[in-house]
Image: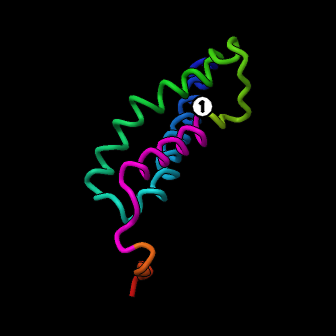
Amino acid sequence: MAGDTESLVSVAFLMTFASITPALISGAVADRLKFSVWMLFVPVWLVLVYSPVTYWVYSGWHHGNGALDFVGVTAIHVNAGVAALAFVLVLGKRKGWPTEATPPHTCP
């Protein structure tokens, strides 16, 4: 029974980061991307990019290759940063930037 609890805690821990990491990318693509494209991108990116990198980090694969990772910096922050940079390079500047200011998105 202790093994089941340990597995559940591990899954909850990793799923928390899997849900937070796309949120880091979303700041870079705000006002540049349709929401439907974002909804398609997130699961594809999680499976093809985030999951393998997270496996390398948390399985200890990279330790044997001389890399150190403290608290999942590679799996979360570097992974999200590189994805956000790639998105920005592909999508380009926001429409109207820098001549037009985007109005704040507040509720009335």
Q: Looking at the picture, how far across and down is residue 67, in whole percent?
A: 71, 22
Q: Nearer the viewer, residue 106 or 82?
A: 82
Which residue of the protein is positioned furthest toward the top in this rendering?
A: 64
Q: Which residue is at 37% across, 48% downward? A: 90
Left or right relative to 59: residue 69 = right
Q: Which residue is at 65% across, 34% downward? A: 72
Q: Which residue is at 48% across, 24% downward? A: 52
The quadrant the C terminus occupies is: bottom left
Look at the magenta stretch and give its main secondary structure: helix
Left or right relative to 107: residue 1 = right
Left or right relative to 94: residue 79 = right
Total labels: the figure holds 1
Examine the structure image and report whether residue 92 is included in the region drawn in magenta. Answer: yes
Which residue of the protein is positioned furthest toward the front in this rendering?
A: 99
| Residues drawn in magenta | 75-96
Look at the picture and state if 8 lies above or below 32. above
The quadrant the N terminus occupies is: top right
Look at the picture and state if 65 lies above or below 38. above
Q: Which residue is at 48% across, 44% downward? A: 19
SS state under label 1: helix
Quadrant of the image occupied by residue 9: top right
Q: Looking at the picture, how far across and down is residue 87, in whole percent?
A: 41, 48
Residue type indicated by callout 1: Val
Asked if residue 106 can be seen in this view, the reply is: no
How did the renderer colour the structure?
A: rainbow
Examine the structure image and report whether residue 78 is included in the region drawn in magenta. Answer: yes
Q: Looking at the picture, how far across and down is residue 33, in whole percent?
A: 32, 58
Q: Looking at the picture, how far across and down is residue 66, in whole percent?
A: 73, 16
Asked if residue 58 can be seen in this view, the reply is: yes
Look at the picture and state if 69 lies above or below 66. below
- Mark 1, residue position: 9
Quadrant of the image occupied by residue 100: bottom left
